[in-house]
Amino acid sequence: MHREPDVGFDPGSPGSRPGPKASAKPLRHPGIPNPVYFRAEEQSAMWKERGERERSRLPTEQEARCGVLRESNKLAEMEEPPLLPGENIKDMAKDVTYICPFTGAVRGTLTVTNYRLYFKSMERDPPFVLDASLGVISRVEKIGGASSRGENSYGLETVCKDIRNLRFAHKPEGRTRRSIFENLMKYAFPVSNNLPLFAFEYKEIFPENGWKLYDSLLEYRRQGIPNESWRITKINERYELCDTYPALLVVPANIPDEELKRVASFRSRGRIPVLSWIHPESQATITRCSQPMVGVSGKRSKEDEKYLQAIMDSNAQSHKIFIFDARPSVNAVANKAKGGGYESEDAYQNAELVFLDIHNIHVMRESLRKLKEIVYPNIEETHWLSNLESTHWLEHIKLILAGALRIADKIESGKTSVVVHCSDGWDRTAQLTSLAMLMLDGYYRSIRGFEVLIEKEWLSFGHRFQLRLGHGDKNHADADRSPVFLQFIDCVWQMTRQFPTAFEFNEYFLITILDHLYSCLFGTFLCNSEHQRGKENLPKRTVSLWSYINSQLEDFTNPLYGSYSNHVLYPVASMRHLELWVGYYVRWNPRMKPQEPIHNRYKELLAKRAELQKKVEELQREISNRSTSSSERASSPAQCVTPVQTVV
């Protein structure tokens, strides 16, 4: 099992988390670092046994000397965090004060392991616990100097990637700040210190192996590929055609591999148009790629033009193809100066170019920064709507959803094939193709199908997770960082709000994915491409996030789900129908959260549904048995007449 999301921040409030309970169910690992304001609730049997084993090593005399201390202060047994396989304590500082932005100062013990930052209160009962993975930390800053005056003016502040800051005050005379700071800088940023990420140390074993979830051949066969128009090529088997693409690619059947190389030379970073999805009836396709390298001189490539014509010809129901360029037109024009650009409708006959006006990674990063400022730590009620509007966050979400909707509509209603790209084809392109496929194909709205969608459109096609997230890198100002994948998950959440019965997964599933996007507990979101993951041998050296999720599906299942495999979803991409995802962005603020996590209710509903389903099946069997008995009784007199007469 996993840790449930927190329901409140204030340890003294009705919604706060109590301390460990003797009756708590065993926990495999802490799962997501849900609200920082964590309690150490369900200890796993392994952790419990480990703690007992460690305590049993104390000599009898030492136990006797510590007896009085343990009676007066339970920290002797409870201050250390529950440890995962491969996790160990690196530093511990007592008498540290956590500066809670909502409830004030909390005194306790601060522990740093090679995976997490863990704080536990000294005086509260139940204890207040804060538990955050080191992977979520963006930067660590010192506050005040040794001569600083004023209470709690000397300490550390950690700025996190998940919309929160954690501030701890140290006593200058205690000299603990320096040690904690150095260990945080070392283990929160292992890549900068030539150390392995914790995912390489974590050795938990789950009933399912999530690395085996996605098989590209099986997924293409599910879509009916190969067929007479499309073939699977192994030209990129050694990642020589394009080192950011997967090993197996689906291309038009009449284009030989030699021509693919010439097309690759005309596309940015060799990312040629390849198939992502094909409509099972019309054969209209979604293909993805990067921008053409036309430059200011307007270069052309006969091979590239022939290639797009082949994509159009593979769909007999349409004699046109749409090219959706995710960028604002002004940005696409500006890219010509760098050698890039866009397709000219004069060069690409029967093609229509559409710009979707989605901004670049730098604009999105700034938008998220503004959003964080208005939701954490305090929300200004009087100017909430205007402040939210000033971030432009929901406007960006709207443009991404609207773009995906246009793509899905062209495929479904227009029966027309589309080509999707941005600049390099690994950020906005992935957002658009995966969202459009989610609208078109009900398989991707199941839990396993959604995991396949992420593996396929994001991981195998080279979204640069390492660069966009900065795993283990102390360079927090890196211009390559951007919340691209976060925006995708936000868009998915918006769709679940509009179609609450169309998705097998619940909100907690999405939050779990986002939290482990940063945690570095699993290997799923490490590296920048399939090629790099193979070189690092991640399936052998790390655990997949899907191993954890798929081993306890009941926690992530939507009880209202109805399978809509043949239904296409058309979400309303209007500001009037979009809302800020409070359950994620504002979850650290207890005043903005429900008193009980909604997924607890989901689990209760699932259990109730299973119970009712069982009763229905029992009643059906009973009816069937009664019907059979009635039939036998109805026929028994006729069968008994002859024997009686024979006896007579």
Image (cartoon, rainbow, N blue to C red):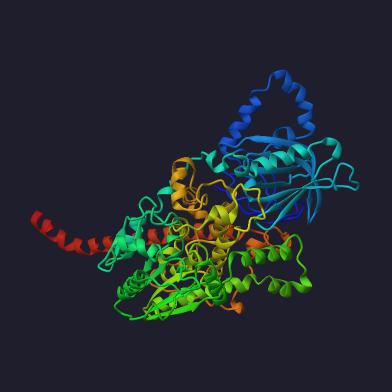
386 sits left or right of 444 in the view: right
- Residue at position x 77%, y 22% in the image: 65
Instruction: State the image quarter where residue 20 is shown.
Output: top right
Q: Quadrant of the C terminus?
A: bottom left
Q: How many marks?
A: 0
Q: Going by the image, does 121 lie left or right of 453?
A: right
- Across and down, in percent, residue 112 comes to 68, 40
Residue in the foreground of this view, choosing between 380 and 583: 380
The image shows residue 340, relative to residue 611, as above or below, that is below
Q: Choose between 480 and 348: the one closer to the eye.
A: 348
Tell me residue 17's x, y (percent): 69, 50
Q: Is residue 68 left or right of residue 292?
A: right
In the image, 25 versus 314, the foreground residue is 314
**Residue 171 place in picture, x, y as percent:** 84, 40
* Residue 432 visible in this rendered orientation of the protein: yes
Left or right of 473, for residue 260? left
The answer to which of 442 and 51 lies nearer the viewer is 442
> Would residue 207 be seen by someone viewing this image from the given angle?
no
- The x and y percentages for residue 385 are 71, 74
Instruction: Give the answer, above or below, for where 217 lies relative to 498.
Output: above
Q: Give the residue drawn at x 43%, y 54%.
A: 243
- Whether residue 487 is situated above or below residue 208 in the rendered picture: below
